[in-house]
């Protein structure tokens, strides 16, 4: 029998065929759907409130929303913020109104990528959520605190989903080989899984797309065993990147390449990936927001003006929109890519946070404490403090760290013109403290 000619041609992709329909088949997110966990309790009780699922792609947000609807046997309306407008939202709400009789539970309205909805689109949901016309389930890969309007966010619980770990991904592979209607008819031996896990990036959909690509590429006419190795996986995925990226997850690879190109001081590559994002319909404010982060994280004190430029870019894109916003994005991208680089600011705060987590709340030295009352002054609060502006160069050689941290260094100036000046000034003021 020719397996290739008997492959189910018009069936959905493996990732869709393997989509769980109940919590017992759902992989990962035990903190939300494990025994006794908050979402499982809510679903099993039959009473759900509006909530937002926040997490990376391919970890089960859409699947979880569908399981909720299936378990509760409620009407289910699904919209994608990528191709739905206010009109679509209102039509879904009107349909939901017609489904709600007397004390019948309200229908579920699922909105994928809710962070892409504009303020007016999100506003159109408010009344329906407030009045209980629908139970809203939103899914987003972006922080809801920044992307969802406050009135709507205040009416929803936010549940954070985590990237799938190695055990979860291996379980998904095993289930696909054993339970899929087509794959279970094949003899498949997986000798190596590192490449499959690596290309998935913790994303179940990417994992199953890659698995399907490799298997379909290895099927022959004689029913022989299919052996999957890391080499075969990487070869097939590279040859069929468009098929592998069926649901547009390359979006995350493009933004990653964009960030790394700016960080790597390559303006040509950075503008190329910027164009890819614009042409692909990426939210321009998403790009502008990444530029603000880049300016602080990767350029920082090497060129403090970069952050001002990025903030101005965000404001300008927000006010003028597209297509003119592309010019501002391009200017800022080129400016950041060609700026000197330093990550000393993020390293400093992360180093300090690490120490604070280890040492807890160390006492502030007495001479630095606030002394608003006579009792505090009598106790020595603020005693011995010297006002820096009363001294030459507005500097006084005080010890500002708690005794347990004296000598600790968190900020290490980077190797660039701006921070070399900072380094020399610190050496001069602190007489050796910043020698390294």
Image: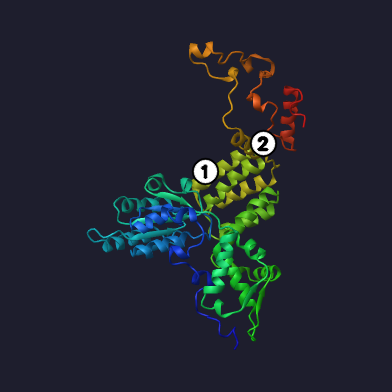
Residue 304: x and y in percent read 64, 36
- Taking the view exactly as shown, the residue that stands out farthest to the bottom is 1
Q: Kindly indicate the quadrant of the structure image that contains residue 308.
A: top right
Residue 344: x and y in percent read 68, 38
- Taking the view exactly as shown, the residue that stands out farthest to the front is 35
**For discs 1 and 2, the disc positioned in front in the rendered view:** 2
Q: Residue at x 63, y 62 (%)?
A: 197
Name the image quarter holding the C terminus: top right
Residue count near mark 2 (Cα–Cα under 10 Å), binned few <14, some 14–19, many ≥20: many
In this view, 218 is above or below 99: below
Judging depth in this view, the residue of 291 and 56 nearest the camera is 56
In this view, 60 is above or below 149: below
In this view, 310 is above or below 422: below
Residue 311: x and y in percent read 56, 41
In this view, 336 is above or below 382: below
Answer whether residue 82 is visible to the viewer in this image: no
Name the image quarter holding the N terminus: bottom right
Residue count near mark 1 (Cα–Cα under 10 Å), binned few <14, some 14–19, many ≥20: some
Q: For residue 301, which numbered disc appears in the image? A: 2
Judging depth in this view, the residue of 384 and 145 nearest the camera is 384
> Dot 2: what SS?
helix
Residue bearing the label numbered 1: 315
Q: Kindly indicate the quadrant of the structure image that contains residue 405.
A: top right
Judging depth in this view, the residue of 47 and 348 nearest the camera is 47
């Amino acid at each position: 029998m020719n397996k290739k000619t008997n492959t189910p041609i018009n069936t959905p992709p493996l990732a869709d065929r393997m989509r769980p329909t109940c919590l017992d088949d759902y992989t990962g997110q035990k903190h939300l759907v494990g025994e006794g966990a908050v979402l499982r309790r809510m679903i099993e009780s039959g009473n759900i409130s509006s909530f937002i699922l926040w997490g990376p792609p391919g970890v089960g947000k859409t699947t979880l929303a569908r399981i909720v609807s299936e378990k509760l046997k409620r009407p289910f309306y699904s919209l994608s913020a990528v191709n739905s407008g206010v009109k679509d939202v209102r039509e879904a709400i009107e349909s939901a109104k017609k489904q709600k009789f007397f004390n019948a539970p309200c229908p579920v309205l699922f909105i994928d990528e809710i962070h892409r909805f504009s303020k007016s689109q999100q506003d159109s949901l408010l009344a329906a959520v407030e009045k209980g016309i629908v139970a809203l389930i939103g899914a987003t890969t972006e922080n809801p605190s920044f992307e969802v309007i406050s009135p709507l966010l205040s009416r929803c619980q936010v549940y954070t989903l985590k990237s799938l770990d190695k055990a979860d991904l291996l379980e998904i592979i095993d289930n696909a080989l054993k339970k899929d209607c087509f794959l279970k008819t094949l003899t498949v031996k997986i000798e190596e899984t590192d490449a499959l896990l690596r290309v998935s990036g913790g994303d179940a959909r990417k994992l199953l797309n890659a698995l399907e690509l490799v298997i379909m590429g290895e099927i022959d006419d004689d029913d022989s065993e299919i052996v999957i190795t890391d080499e075969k996986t990487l070869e097939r995925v590279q040859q069929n990147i468009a098929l592998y990226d069926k649901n547009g997850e390359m979006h995350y690879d493009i933004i990653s390449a964009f960030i790394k190109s700016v960080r790597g001081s390559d303006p040509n590559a950075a503008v190329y990936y910027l164009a890819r994002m614009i042409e692909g319909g990426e939210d321009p404010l998403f790009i502008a927001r990444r530029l603000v982060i880049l300016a602080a994280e990767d350029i920082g004190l090497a060129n403090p003006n970069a952050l001002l430029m990025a903030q101005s870019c965000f404001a300008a894109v927000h006010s003028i929109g597209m297509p003119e916003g592309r010019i501002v994005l391009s200017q800022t991208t080129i400016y950041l890519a060609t700026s000197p680089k330093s990550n000393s600011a993020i390293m400093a705060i992360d180093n300090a946070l690490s120490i604070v987590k280890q040492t807890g709340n160390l006492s502030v030295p007495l001479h630095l404490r606030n002394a608003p009352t006579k009792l505090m002054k009598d106790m020595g609060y603020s005693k011995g403090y010297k006002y820096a502006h009363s001294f030459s160069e507005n500097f006084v050689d005080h010890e500002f760290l708690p005794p347990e941290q004296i000598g600790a260094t968190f900020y290490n100036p980077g190797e660039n013109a701006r921070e070399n000046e900072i380094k020399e000034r610190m050496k001069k003021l602190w007489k050796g403290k910043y020698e390294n």
